[in-house]
Image: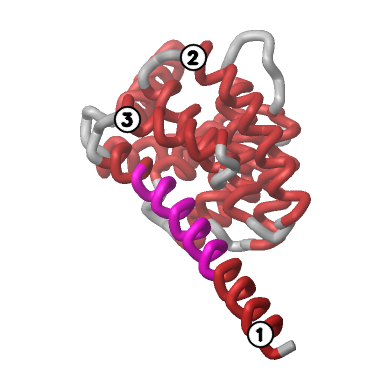
Amino acid sequence: MRRFLVSLFIVLVMLVLSAAFAGEEAQNCFEEAQKALWSGDTEEALKLFEECAEQGIRPHDAYFEMGLIYYREGEYLSAFRISKKAIRAFRTHLEAHPDDHRSWFRLAYIYELRSEAPSVNEWKKAREALEEALKRSENNSLYLLHLGYVCYKIGDMEKAKEAFERVVATQPSNAYARYYLALLDLKAGNIEQAKSAFSWIVENLPESSPLHQGAKKELARLEEEKDEG
């Protein structure tokens, strides 16, 4: 009996060590993929992230990173193909971890990028995922910024304004929030407020910034309309 108990104890110890080793190996796999990505070796990063996904090692995050790599490199068909796998993986992950606000945000971002493609309209799905993220991280300015943008695209201007104003309340120098608030002011006919916001962007952002260029064009257009009037 004693020999049996000793043998059983050894087996249990081996199982624990094996599980710990497997967990460490899995973490190392994902970390190696991230290191390759950060070093600029996207080919190696893609290979490692794919291995992670195939082995069930954070597949939602692995597919997300793969999709971003393809998207940044202009391989949109590959990015779109991977996004389908990513969505399924995130849905599975969130069923087991519904309080993971970061994953809700990443899922929303996938829907956002997909919705920029012709004939794809998943803005409402993006909004739903962002609202889930904000339930768990209610003052997250990044989530609010994206919620504002998504609501703007949907046409819910009131909700978009509310989200952008919450961003500016905590981050007064957030140019993206200010820019979209200016666009909302234009739609509402608040011309002077819009001009003030656009002027702030032109004065505080470098000329190379797309927001600077956009604000400059809007100011020029408003001046032309004023002269014509």
Residue type, numbered disc 2: Tyr
Q: Position of residue 143 (x, y in %)?
A: 57, 50
As drawn, is 10 to the left or to the right of 87?
left
Q: Position of residue 6 (x, y in %)?
A: 63, 84
Q: Position of residue 100 (x, y in %)?
A: 64, 57
Q: Can you see residue 46?
A: yes
Q: Nearer the viewer, mark 1 or mark 3?
A: 1
Label 3 near label 2: C-beta < 8 Å?
Answer: no
Residue type, numbered disc 3: Glu
SS at circle 3: helix
Q: Which mark is residue 166?
A: none
Residue at the disc numbered 2: 76
Residue, x 63% and y 78% (percent of image)? 7
Residue at the disc numbered 3: 44
Quarter of the image for residue 32 reads top left
Report the Cα–Cα distance between label 2 and label 1: 62 Å
The front one of 22 and 97 is 22
Residue type, numbered disc 1: Arg
Residue at the disc numbered 1: 3
Vertical placement of residue 55 versus 78, above or below? below
The front one of 43 and 160 is 43
Tag count: 3
Residue, x 56% and y 52% (percent of image)? 165
As drawn, is 65 to the left or to the right of 147?
left
**Is 7 in the magenta?**
no
Most extreme residue toward the bottom is 2
First to last magenta residue range:
17-32
The front one of 192 and 136 is 136
Residue, x 58% and y 70% (percent of image)? 16
Q: Can you see residue 158?
A: no
